[in-house]
């Protein structure tokens, strides 16, 4: 149980109380010394004599026997009505018990929230065995800026310019990311939009990058964004010999490796430093991606670096690594 921060007698204090009495001090003198009542001292001394040190622990205030406990058939009726998606007050009216009783019963059987009625979907983790069997592609939108904003500087009142000064909208830039399912090797680039022509150009650049590493890509997974549903992207996949797989609508976990990589990029690159402009942030992206692929241990592949999952000969290593 939780003990109040200002409690005079935590379990250690009760042991001290018992020790003082056992040394010959009277209950009244111990009560005066500890600034507690005589009744309290007597209570803890009595419990210690009956149960030992275990008797000095806190106990539940719930009575040993309830005066009018809720009948089992009523509990079953409450649970059955809840599984029919009735609200607590509706159940209380039908069963003729208080809403508080219904709430306690539902909490006891873990049905307090409506989402508890839905069976939890089992996690489906997958990882392709060979590099290039599947690559994941996604896009993250970032705002352009010419000076640091409150997300980096902290509170808006701490900004180096007057609070009343309004930042003029500078538009958006789009981080296109691609990550290999088996090795976690990533390829990134920033484009001014997320149109179908841009998506095709990024796909071709990603395939070329993996080709330099000796990786032949077979499948590509994307979400259902307009650029990925376009005929241009479909034709590009056919031309490159790729099988295009799209995620289930409103199910980002299907493309979880790309989503997780974006979160890592946000935390370790986009907002890790106080960039003065978005252009400076963009300049650091290639070096950060290089660090991610070549030097950063990845938990999903047993704390190995992504590039270690690929067999590179010395000539490729000297050409690619810089």
Image (tube, rainbow, N blue to C red):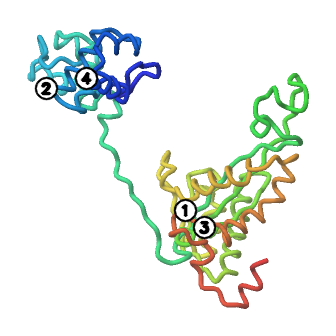
Residue at figure coordinates x 46%, y 19% from the top left: 6
Compare residues 177 and 7 and report the one nearer the observer: 7
Circle 1 is placed at which residue position?
221
Q: In the image, which disc is placed on residue 60?
A: 4
Compare residues 15 and 30 and report the one nearer the observer: 30
Along the polypeptide, which appears first: circle 2 or circle 4?
4
Residue at figure coordinates x 24%, y 25% from the top left: 82
The alpha-carbon separation of the residues under discs 1 and 2 comes to 47 Å
Q: Secondary structure at mark 1?
A: strand
Circle 3 is placed at which residue position?
297
Does 12 sit left or right of 208 as displayed? left
Q: Secondary structure at mark 3?
A: loop
Foreground mark, 3 or 2, reads: 3
Kindly indicate the quadrant of the structure image that contains residue 114. Answer: top left
Residue 209 on image: x %, y %: 70, 75
Q: Secondary structure at mark 4?
A: loop
- Quadrant of the drawing holding the N terminus: top left
Along the polypeptide, which appears first: circle 4 or circle 1?
4
The alpha-carbon separation of the residues under discs 2 and 4 comes to 26 Å
Q: Would you say residue 262 is visible in this rendering?
A: yes
Foreground mark, 2 or 4, reads: 4
Q: Would you say residue 83 is visible in this rendering?
A: no
Along the polypeptide, which appears first: circle 1 or circle 2?
2
Along the polypeptide, which appears first: circle 3 or circle 2?
2
Q: Are marks 3 and 4 in contact (CB under 8 Å)?
A: no
Label 1 packing within 10 angstroms: few (<14), some (14-19), many (20+): many
Compare residues 141 and 31 and report the one nearer the observer: 31
């Amino acid at each position: 149980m939780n003990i109040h921060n200002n409690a005079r007698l935590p379990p250690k204090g009760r042991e001290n109380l018992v020790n003082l009495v056992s040394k010959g001090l009277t209950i009244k003198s111990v009560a005066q010394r500890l600034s507690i009542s005589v009744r309290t001292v007597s209570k803890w001394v009595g419990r210690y004599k009956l149960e030992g040190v275990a008797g000095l622990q806190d106990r539940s205030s719930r009575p040993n026997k309830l005066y009018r406990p809720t009948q089992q058939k009523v509990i079953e009726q409450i649970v059955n009505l809840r599984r029919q998606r009735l609200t607590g007050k509706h159940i209380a009216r039908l069963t003729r018990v208080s809403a508080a009783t219904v709430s306690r019963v539902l909490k006891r059987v873990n049905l307090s929230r409506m989402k508890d009625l839905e069976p939890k979907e089992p996690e489906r983790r997958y990882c392709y065995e060979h590099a290039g069997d599947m690559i994941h592609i996604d896009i993250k939108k970032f705002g352009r800026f010419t000076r640091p904003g409150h997300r980096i500087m902290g509170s808006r009142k701490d900004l180096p310019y007057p609070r009343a000064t309004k930042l003029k909208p500078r538009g958006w830039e789009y981080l296109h990311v691609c990550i290999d399912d088996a090795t976690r090797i990533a390829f990134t680039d920033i484009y001014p939009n997320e149109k179908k022509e841009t998506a095709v150009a990024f796909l071709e650049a990603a395939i070329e990058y993996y080709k330099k590493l000796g990786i032949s890509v077979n499948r590509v997974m994307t979400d259902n964004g307009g650029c990925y549903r376009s005929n241009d992207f479909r034709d590009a996949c056919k031309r490159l010999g790729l099988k295009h797989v799209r995620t289930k609508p409103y199910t980002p976990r299907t493309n979880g490796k790309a989503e997780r990589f974006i979160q890592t990029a946000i935390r370790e690159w986009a907002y890790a430093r106080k960039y003065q402009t978005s252009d400076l942030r963009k300049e650091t992206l290639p070096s950060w991606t290089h660090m991610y692929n070549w030097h950063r241990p990845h938990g999903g592949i047993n704390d190995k670096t992504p590039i270690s999952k690929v067999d590179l000969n010395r000539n490729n290593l000297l050409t690619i690594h810089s």
